[in-house]
Amino acid sequence: MATSGLGSEKFRDAGTVVLETVEMHTGGEALRIITSGYPPIKGRTLLEKRRYVRDNLDYLRVLLMAEPRGHFDMYGALLVEKDEAEEEGKEDDADLAVLFMHNEGYSTMCGHAVISLGRYAVDYNLVKPVSPETPVRIHCPCGMVTAHVQYQNGRSGDVWFESVPSFVFAADQKIQLSGYGEVSYDICCGGTFYAVAEAGEFGLSIGTSPLEELQRAGHSLTSKLRELSVPLTHPEGSDICFIYGTVLTDGKDTFSAADPTAQLVVYADRQVDRSPCGSGTMSRIALQFHKGQIGIGQERAFVNSKTGSRFMATALRKVSYASHDDAVVVKVSGRGCYTGEARYWAEEGDTLGKGFLI
């Protein structure tokens, strides 16, 4: 059956906004890259743009992330204009700037998105490809992240990125959680703040316990810390200062080159990452380094306990980051894959088409 004409004007009302996307996934975690269709976004800096989109254009996030176009665990990346120059002749040297979105709102860092965006930037001519590896500077709300994209024989491949400084904010904490009793956890930041806790603290196994029970446990810790308004600080400002989610682990924190460590990240509004989670992995590397469980240059495998997808990660170097003397810059590597391209719009009178979650 011929499908020519899909998306032509006869299928929609005049003046309807059409949103164009490139669809990818990294380690099973979806990424919907929004390439066009958004109205002009106000703001000199990326964080100002994030606030503007959150306060004025959130209906478009709902339209693209929620059903019927998305689903409860959908994730998106909105390409935006780079920062305006603060001084004449001093330009933002990013190759692209991006805002991240999910089922609840807008995050400040996303490693799986950076990996896919690296390939996208090379393949869609946002940067000039160079063999054997092409650097792509991606301005994220938490700061500049450089992706390095393998490029051989005209094709892009695996990607690794060099993170913003990652650090431990509060180690060896304890909290009482309804239904679980006392739970030990740490608070770490890999471009966004996570609680990190062993699944065993909740009486669960990261590998064999049902997903719903792990999801409930992770969200219970996140919710409690949000409820308590744990005072967070970050050198990039207050926009970063919220508990984004919980990294549940297998407790295998001491370095092993042969034995991967498993984790599952529950973030936003009970959203479950299908990948090992780039920013969650950054946070765990920072925590392991802080506790003397991994050294500079030691590479380790991190796997998603349910999908089996894998990232490799290394503490590249120790840095001082504001008051955090043992912060680390982390290398995370993986591969993003294309799943398609799409155009989306909403028909007049289609109430459900505005977006919903069940």
Image (cartoon, rainbow, N blue to C red):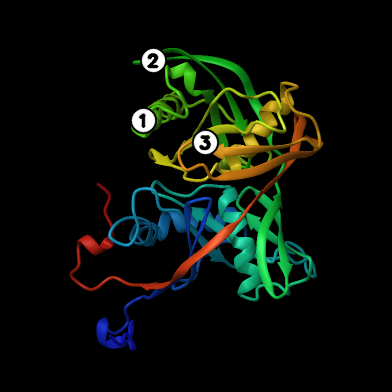
- Indicate the amino acid at tag 3: Phe
**Of the pair 201 and 101, the residue shown nearer to us:** 201
Mark 2 touching mark 1, by CB under 8 A?
no
Residue shown at the point (60%, 51%) measured from the top left: 141
Res. 234 visible in picture: no
Q: Secondary structure beneath disc 1?
A: loop
Residue 273 picture location, percent across and down: 47, 43
**Of the pair 305 and 98, the residue shown nearer to us:** 305
Residue shown at the point (38%, 56%) measured from the top left: 65
Q: Earlier in the sequence, mark 2 or mark 1?
A: 2
Res. 358 visible in picture: yes
Q: Quadrant of residue 355?
A: bottom left
State the residue position of label 3. 242
Q: Quadrant of residue 288?
A: top right
Q: Earlier in the sequence, mark 3 or mark 2?
A: 2
Q: Is residue 129 left or right of residue 334?
A: right
Residue shown at the point (24%, 73%) measured from the top left: 347
Residue 107 tag number = none
State the residue position of label 1. 210
Residue 78 picture location, percent across and down: 51, 62
Residue shown at the point (72%, 62%) measured from the top left: 150
State the residue position of label 2. 180
Badge 2 density bin: few <14, some 14–19, many ≥20, Cα 10 Å: some
Residue 112 picture location, percent across and down: 57, 51
In 3D space, how far apart are the residues under numbered discs 3 and 2 (Cα atoms)? 23 Å
- Indicate the amino acid at tag 2: Tyr
Q: Is residue 65 left or right of residue 116?
A: left
- Indicate the amino acid at tag 1: Pro
Q: Earlier in the sequence, mark 1 or mark 3?
A: 1
